[in-house]
Amino acid sequence: MKKQPHTGCHFGLPPKDMHWWRNARFGMFIHWGVYAIPGRGEWLMWNEQIPFREYRRLADQFRPRKFDANAWAACARDAGMKYLVLTTRHHDGFCLFDSKVSDFTSVKTAAKRDFIAEYVVACRKAGLKVGFYYSPLDWRFPGFFFPDLYRESAEAMKQQTYDQVRELLTNYGKIDILWFDGGGDDWLGFGGIEWGGSKPGWHSRDSNWPQVEHFKGKPLWEPDKLYAMIRTLQPKIVMNDRAGHSDTGWSGDFGTPEGRIGEFNTTRACETCDTMTGSWGYRHGSTMRSLRNCIHMLVNCAIRDGNLLLNVGPTADGEIEPSQVRRLGQVGQWLKQYGESICATRGGPVIPRKWGGTTHRGNRIYVHVLDWTEDEIILPPVQHKVKTSRALTCRSANVKVARDGIHISVPQKDRQAPDTIILLETKGK
C-alpha cells in the first residue's frame, strides 16, 4: 500500500509511542568516519582547515579490517544499553551508507561497504533499537557559511539533506530514532557569521546557545516540509530537537543537552549526550571516564527523568577500544544488579538534591544516594504512606517516617561508593 503523505500540523509522537524510549534510559552513541584515521577528533577538517581535495584522500585509506557491527551491538547490549545511534554522515560529508546523491561514501571509496546496512542488521539481531545520526550541515558547501551570498550552494546542501534522509528512511527497514545535528536556520554559518546589521563588518550574530538573536537571512531548511516527509516514511520514528523549529513551535520529541545533565522535567523528554573519553570521534591517548563517573551520569539523568546517550569513537580499523568495552561491561554488570532502579522508571517524586535523588515505578520509590553530604538524608513527605523499606546495595538501612519527611541513614561501612540505593514501597501508586 502506498504511504499517504503526512498532512497534520503536529509532528510530535503521542506518549504511547515514546514509552519504549523513556523506559530504555541508556543508549550508545557512536561517532565514526574517515576522521578516525588521523585520530584527532571528528572536527579535524574544520579545526585544521584542511582543503576538501586533501581531506577526501582519507577515504582512499579507509579500510576498517576489524569492523564488526555484531561486536558493537554486543558491547552495547552487555553495557545494559537498549538502543544505538550511529553517525550516518557527520559535518565533513562522508557517508557510511550507499547514497545515490554523493560520491563521498564508504561504498564508492576504498572500503566498498555499506556500514549502515551491516549496523542495522546487527542491532536487530541483538534486540536493540536502531538510531541514525545525520548532519544537515556540510562543510563542503560554501552555502552553509554564507547562505545568502552562495544561495545556490545552500539550496544544494538542503536538497542533499532531503535526498539522503529519504534514502536512510527508505532503504534500511524500520528505524527507531533520527538524531539530527546542525540543522535549522540558526545553525547556518556556525550560528552566526554575518555582515552588517546592528554591527559593522563581519561579526558573530550570537555566541549563546540556544540563540537569542536569530538568523535574519532568507529561510532555508523548511523544517515542516522535512518533518512531514519523515513522518510519512517512518511514522513512529523518535526525533530529536536539532533540525529546526516547526512553524507550530514543535522542536523534536526530546531535548538534547550536550556535555551536561538536563534539568528535572517530567513533561519534556530529555536525553543527555556525552562522551566516554572527552572526544566524540576517535582521538589518540584520550582519558577514559571512571566507572563511578559513568554510573553517576546515568543515575543523574534517570533521577531527572532523562536518558543518557554515552558516546564511543571506534578506531580507524573499526574497533571500539578494549578498555572502553571493559568499562562499559562494568556498567552493565552494575545494571544487572540494580537496573530495576533505573530502567522503566520515571524521575522523582523527589526533586534531585546535592546528595542524589529518586526514581519510581508503580508503588516503588528508589532512593539514590550518590554523595553522602550528611549522615542522614531527609526526603520530603510523599503522597502515599510508606509500607516497607529495604536496602538494595547494602545489608540494611535505617528508615524512619516522621511528620517532616522520611529519614534515611546507612552505616558508613555499608555505603556503596557509586550509589547507595534504598527501596521504599508505598500503599498506593
Image (cartoon, helix red, strand yellow):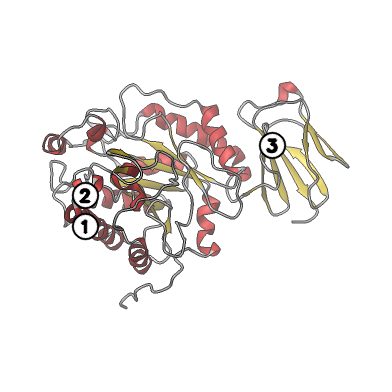
Whether pointer 1 and pointer 2 mark residues with C-beta atoms closer than 8 Å, the reply is yes
Q: Dividing the image into 4 quarters, which one contains the C terminus?
A: bottom right
Whether pointer 1 and pointer 3 mark residues with C-beta atoms closer than 8 Å, the reply is no
Task: Identify the residue under disc 3.
Answer: 392
Residue found at x 62% / y 49%: 345
Badge 2 local density, few (<14 within 10 Å), some, or many (20+)?
many
Task: Identify the residue under disc 2.
Answer: 143
Q: Secondary structure at mark 1?
A: helix
Cα–Cα gap, marks 1 and 3: 57 Å
Q: Amino acid at mark 1?
A: Glu
The reply to whether residue 316 is visible in this rendering is: no
Residue 276 at x, y percent in the picture = 43, 31
Residue found at x 67% / y 32%: 354
Residue 411 at x, y percent in the picture = 77, 24
Of residues 387 and 30, the one drawn nearer to the viewer in this rendering: 30
Q: Which mark identifies residue 155?
A: 1
Residue found at x 43% / y 64%: 236
Residue 90 at x, y percent in the picture = 28, 44
Whether pointer 2 and pointer 3 mark residues with C-beta atoms closer than 8 Å, the reply is no
**Front disc: 2 or 3:** 2
Badge 3 local density, few (<14 within 10 Å), some, or many (20+)?
some
| 1 or 3: tag closer to the N-terminus | 1
Q: Secondary structure at mark 2?
A: helix
Q: Amino acid at mark 2?
A: Gly
